[in-house]
Image: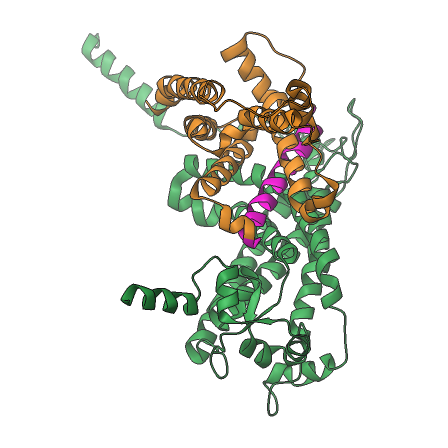
């Protein structure tokens, strides 16, 4: 019964909430009414928007020494999670069999282990930094903590189910993934997608005024 | 002539059959021909496969190295009796020792708390605080803590799960615990080594021997003689614990890496030694951690604050680390209670008082 629920209806529900929620949120951002920018355009906004999307991957020199921990841990976590999500053997075969109908070459086991460790260590350090740094602690909301803990739990249950021998462990992992997908559109997890329009808007706004953002 | 009746014949037949069935089978020895004077030892009837299996099982204590198509360490050994002996040693001796040690130390700490209670701050809290640990140092400490606790719990499930959890939860649930713990333990193991190296690079400068440490050790931190020995940033006990964590932690990490990577040519003996070293090292760390956690939380008032907020009360600093406290106060590194509250995002008492007065107007 539980197996049917997790593999069937709850999986489809979570996918629907995730898909509709993300599209709805992005649509509401893109199509939100904005005041007309009356400033005289000193440069083209488009190229600046495009450039800023990528230039923000590297911090400004002025602040780079202040953010070494979140910078390094952030890259560790995000790259590790990306590799796990799209190149772990069980994930590739799952996506092929259940969603896409085609697959790609997964990463070797040693790369999987390295990615998992980078992701775990990065996430732990990022969350601890949020808790220990006075400024980060003050600006953090409950949602930030829920997102970090939920993501950690998803990764942890995935790690528990690595042997792929126990159905209960696989179901536990899938259930936490479903909770994560349902929570995704209503949380800070949306930055997975919103970082692009956010950076582009900032880049365009400054670029139009001739400022190198 | 009297002819037996069919009924009588049937009865006799049944009785004979019953006797034949109930009688024990005749021994093979009775079939052996009588000993010939030429063969006084008789003829052996031992299964010719017995010798083969005796050698395979190495019951005579001889290590028989066979020939196998598979090339590698100990691939010529079909059944290794030492492995069975090791398994019994691990299940019976190691688990018992670890259980007794953990319960014993936990009991001692409970006893200490009952007898001594929480050691308060001499003179109470002053309200002024001084920074004890940077954000990075606290991140390193808590990273190591999280990883260590995870490894300790999963490691204990793997080591003690069979005698403790199996009877409680049954085979199926225990199998899930064991499988999850094994995968989690193996995956988090290398993170412990990384966290340990982070700690080595960030805390070593505070843990070098300095003048006065020997005095602290000779007075056992104030237990012998009058007064609290003078202490810098860390006392000798804390330094001792730090180097145990680093050195034993490295031993546990290396032995763990040997165990988790069995494909590098290490044989059974090396694996067994690594296993034992891993367990003993981890036990030392767990027992020490119990004491460390006790002292840092319910044992000594104000100690935990240093690792949660990064700041400690100046009276606590005076009582436990007087030399370091004096240095900080001479440099003017202390904060008032209000400044500390603002730093924590809380409403300072002075501001709250002003706000209350304004509300009263």
User: In this rendering, is residue B308 above or below A148?
Assistant: below
Q: Which region is colored magenta?
A: A108-134
**Residue B63, percent from left and from top:** 77, 40
Location of residue A114 (image quadrant): top right
User: What's the image's color scheme?
Assistant: by chain
Q: Main secondary structure of the magenta part?
A: helix
For the N terminus of chain B, the quadrant is: top left
Instruction: Please identify which colour was used for chain A in the image.
Output: orange
Q: Residue A123 lies in magenta, yes or no? A: yes
Residue B118, image x, y percentages = 45, 75
Horizontal side of residue B277 vs A26, given as left or right? right
Q: Is residue B59 visible?
A: no
Give B117 or B303, whichever is nearer the viewer.
B303
Q: Picture coordinates of residue B90 (x, y %)?
A: 59, 50
Q: Which residue is at the front of the view, B319 or A26? A: A26
Q: Is residue A2 magenta?
A: no
Q: Residue at x 57, y 56 (%)?
A: B93
Quarter of the C terminus of chain B within the rendering: bottom left
Question: On screen, A178 above or below B332?
Answer: above
Is any atom of residue B333 visible in this view? yes
| B355, A17: nearer the viewer | B355
Q: Please report the residue visible at 67 percent of the width from the left and 19 percent of the height from the top.
A: A44
* Image-based side of B192 in relation to B352, left or right: right
Q: Which chain is green?
A: B
């Amino acid at each position: 019964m539980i197996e049917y629920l997790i593999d069937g209806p709850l999986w489809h529900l979570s996918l629907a909430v995730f898909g509709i929620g993300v599209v709805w949120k992005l649509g509401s951002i893109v199509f939100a009414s904005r005041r007309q920018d009356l400033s005289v355009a000193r440069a083209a906004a488009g190229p600046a928007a495009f450039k800023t999307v990528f230039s923000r991957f590297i911090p400004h020199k002025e602040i780079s020494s202040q953010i070494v921990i979140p910078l390094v841990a952030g890259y560790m976590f995000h790259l590790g999670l990306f590799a796990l999500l799209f190149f772990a053997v069980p994930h590739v075969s799952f996506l092929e069999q259940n969603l896409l109908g085609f697959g790609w070459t997964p990463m070797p086991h040693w790369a999987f282990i390295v990615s998992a460790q980078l992701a775990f260590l990065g996430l732990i350090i990022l969350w601890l930094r949020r808790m220990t740094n006075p400024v980060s602690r003050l600006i953090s909301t409950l949602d930030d903590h829920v997102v970090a803990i939920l993501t950690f739990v998803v990764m942890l249950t995935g790690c528990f189910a690595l042997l792929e021998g126990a159905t209960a462990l696989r179901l536990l992992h899938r259930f936490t993934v479903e909770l994560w997908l349902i929570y995704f559109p209503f949380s800070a997890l949306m930055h997975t997608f919103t970082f692009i329009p956010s950076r582009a808007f900032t880049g365009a706004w400054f670029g139009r005024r001739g400022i190198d953002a | 002539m009297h002819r037996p009746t069919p009924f009588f014949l049937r009865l006799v037949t049944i009785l004979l059959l019953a006797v034949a069935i109930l009688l024990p089978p005749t021994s093979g020895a009775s079939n052996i021909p009588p000993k010939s004077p030429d063969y006084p030892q008789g003829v052996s009837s031992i299964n010719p496969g017995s010798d083969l299996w005796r050698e395979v099982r190495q019951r005579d204590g001889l290590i028989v190295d066979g020939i196998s198509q598979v090339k590698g360490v100990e691939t010529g050994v079909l059944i290794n009796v030492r492995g069975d002996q090791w398994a019994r040693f691990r299940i019976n001796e190691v688990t018992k020792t670890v259980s007794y040690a953990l319960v014993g130390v936990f009991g001692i700490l409970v006893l200490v708390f009952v007898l001594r209670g929480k050691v308060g701050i001499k003179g109470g809290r002053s309200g002024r605080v001084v920074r004890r640990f940077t954000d990075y140092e606290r991140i390193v400490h808590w990273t190591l803590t999280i990883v260590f606790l995870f490894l300790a719990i999963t490691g204990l499930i793997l080591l003690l799960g069979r005698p403790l959890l199996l009877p409680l939860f049954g085979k199926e649930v225990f199998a899930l615990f064991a499988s999850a713990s094994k995968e989690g333990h193996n995956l988090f193991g290398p993170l412990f080594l990384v966290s340990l190296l982070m700690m080595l690079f960030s805390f070593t400068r505070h843990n070098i021997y300095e003048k006065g440490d020997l005095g602290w050790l000779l007075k056992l931190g104030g237990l012998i003689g009058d007064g609290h020995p003078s202490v810098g940033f860390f006392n000798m006990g804390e330094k001792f614990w730090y180097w145990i964590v680093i050195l034993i932690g490295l031993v546990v990490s290396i032995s763990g890496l040997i165990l988790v990577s069995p494909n590098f040519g290490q044989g059974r003996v090396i694996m067994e030694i690594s296993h034992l070293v891993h367990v003993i090292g981890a036990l030392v760390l767990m027992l020490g951690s119990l004491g460390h956690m006790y002292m840092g939380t319910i044992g000594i008032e104000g100690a935990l604050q240093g690792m949660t907020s990064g700041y400690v009360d100046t009276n606590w600093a005076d009582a436990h680390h007087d030399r370091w406290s004096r240095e900080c106060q001479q440099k003017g590194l202390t904060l008032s209670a209000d400044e500390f509250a603002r730093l924590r995002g809380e409403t300072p008492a002075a501001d709250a008082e002003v706000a209350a007065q304004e509300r009263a107007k």
